[in-house]
Image (cartoon, rainbow, N blue to C red):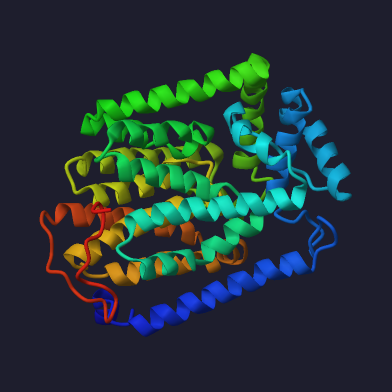
């Protein structure tokens, strides 16, 4: 326990070795998916980039002049089958504002569009992590996380979500209106923005509120002008699919989800009680934001990121990118002010869990992803309550005398 408490096992050489192995394995997996494909279909018989096919086809259908078909399961899946030649059931349950991103990307052929999307995703999360972390070495370790391969293999939007949340938290102190603007852009995935309103209210950041409202309204107006109110009605009607089939029945597999609700459902807990458990998670998140409203920006940001994951029942494992960003905020603060007991070990655990989280949930019904978000939440609350900085320490060769967030 002393080794775990001090984190003495998290040496520079081990961090470098594990990060290198993780990066190489992740790159190898992505390369295999690319080289072993048959056209746009990978070795497993699914579209390359799997979930990206919904984004691309949604943009393509909107470009053809009838955006309402994006939320029509039959039309969307018929388009998917026509492109790839395989049946791959998918759905679009995003608001119309997401089409502002994917209609331009869908003007490209499928594979080039996927490549552009992946490059943009990595660039976005890389820029935000660089603004948070103390140096480029820490940035490379963060990007070597197994979560990177998970997000890119699925062609998912988790890095865009995490980048918007992280950017809002980075800029909230320096330029509140700009930070609020990034928060407002999370309208595209509102289930991961549930802690933003409490944060703004508790910190009385009214300029951030104005920036967020203006951004959200601008996005809504743009989508209405381009695709009409019918697109919003189609989106609202599609929400029952996400709630009943994906969340409550787990048609995609509860093991693929990272929420408290999904863990409860996987353990056989009735739907109503699972919602109660999830509600407690949301209340805990709000309580945590209240507790750290006057804490240092980096610690407060870590709590908000953990609370964002704790608060929503609709959370897939790739969405744990927001927890990764929260861990980056916590690491930046600890690098500057000193690590508390168990922090190094816990951060290493959070970094590594995505390699095994889905398998552990599927084979052992062991919900490791919720454990990481609860762990980060507790660590950040504890650090906020410590009341003052701690002597800067060297993490066995990792930088100790660094500026950290929010200096950049």
Query: Where residue 283 appears, x then y in whole percent?
Result: 34, 38
Quadrant in which the N terminus appears: bottom left
Furthest-bottom residue in view? Answer: 13
99 or 273: nearer the eye? 99
Q: Quadrant of residue 172?
A: top left
Q: Is residue 323 visible?
A: no
Give the tally of numbered discs: 0
Residue occupying the point 41% across, 22% down: 214
Residue 333 screen position, x and y as percent? 24, 59
Which residue is at a point 22% across and 70% down the rendered structure image?
341
Is residue 389 found left or right of 185 in the rendered image?
left
Nearest the eye: 247 or 217: 217
User: In the image, is 275 to the left or to the right of 166?
Assistant: right
Residue 132 in the image, given as x and y percentages of width and height? 33, 55
Q: Specify whether residue 226 is in view.
A: yes
In the displayed structure, would residue 34 be above or below residue 57?
below
Q: Position of residue 2 (x, y in %)?
A: 24, 80
Q: Is residue 195 left or right of residue 400?
A: right
Residue at the spot x=23%, y=63% of the render? Answer: 334
In this view, the residue in front, 387 or 395, is 395
Q: Is residue 138 above or below residue 298?
A: below
Relative placement, left or right, of 34 versus 357 is: right
What residue lies at 41% left-to-right and 59% top-to-bottom? 372
Q: Quadrant of residue 39?
A: bottom right
């Amino acid at each position: 326990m002393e080794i775990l408490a001090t984190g003495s096992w998290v040496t520079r050489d081990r961090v470098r070795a594990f990060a290198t192995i993780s990066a190489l394995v992740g790159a190898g997996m992505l390369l295999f998916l690319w080289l072993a494909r048959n056209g746009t279909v990978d070795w497993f018989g699914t579209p390359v980039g799997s979930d990206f096919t919904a984004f691309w086809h949604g943009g393509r259908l909107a470009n053809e002049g009838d955006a309402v078909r994006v939320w029509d399961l039959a039309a969307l899946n018929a388009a998917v089958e026509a492109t790839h030649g395989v049946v791959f059931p998918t759905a679009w349950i995003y608001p119309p504002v997401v089409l502002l991103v994917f209609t331009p990307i869908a003007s490209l052929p499928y594979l080039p569009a996927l490549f552009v999307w992946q490059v943009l995703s990595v660039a976005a999360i890389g820029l935000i992590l660089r603004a948070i972390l103390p140096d480029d070495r820490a940035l490379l370790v963060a990007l070597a996380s197994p979560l990177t391969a998970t997000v890119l293999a699925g062609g998912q939007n988790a890095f865009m979500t995490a980048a918007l949340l992280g950017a809002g938290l980075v800029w909230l102190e320096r330029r509140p209106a700009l930070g609020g603007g990034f928060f407002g852009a999370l309208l595209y995935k509102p289930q991961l923005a549930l802690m933003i309103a409490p944060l703004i209210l508790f910190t009385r950041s009214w300029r951030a509120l104005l920036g967020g409202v203006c951004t959200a309204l601008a996005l809504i107006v743009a989508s209405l002008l381009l695709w009409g109110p019918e697109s919003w009605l189609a989106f609202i009607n599609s929400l029952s699919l996400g709630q009943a089939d994906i969340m409550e029945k787990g048609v995609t597999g509860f093991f693929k989800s990272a929420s408290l609700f999904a863990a409860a459902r996987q353990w056989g807990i009735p739907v109503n009680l699972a919602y109660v458990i999830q509600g407690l998670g949301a209340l805990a998140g709000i309580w945590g934001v209240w507790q750290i409203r006057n804490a240092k920006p980096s610690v407060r940001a870590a709590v908000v990121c953990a609370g964002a994951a704790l608060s929503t029942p609709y959370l897939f494992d790739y969405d744990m990118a927001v927890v990764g960003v929260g861990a980056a905020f916590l690491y930046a603060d600890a690098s500057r002010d000193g690590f508390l007991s168990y922090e190094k070990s816990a951060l290493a655990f959070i970094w590594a869990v995505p390699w095994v989280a889905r398998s552990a949930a599927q084979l052992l019904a062991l919900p490791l992803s919720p454990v990481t978000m609860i762990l980060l939440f507790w660590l950040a609350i504890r650090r906020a309550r410590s009341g003052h900085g701690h002597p800067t320490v060297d993490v066995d060769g990792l930088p100790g005398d660094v500026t950290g967030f929010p200096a950049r």
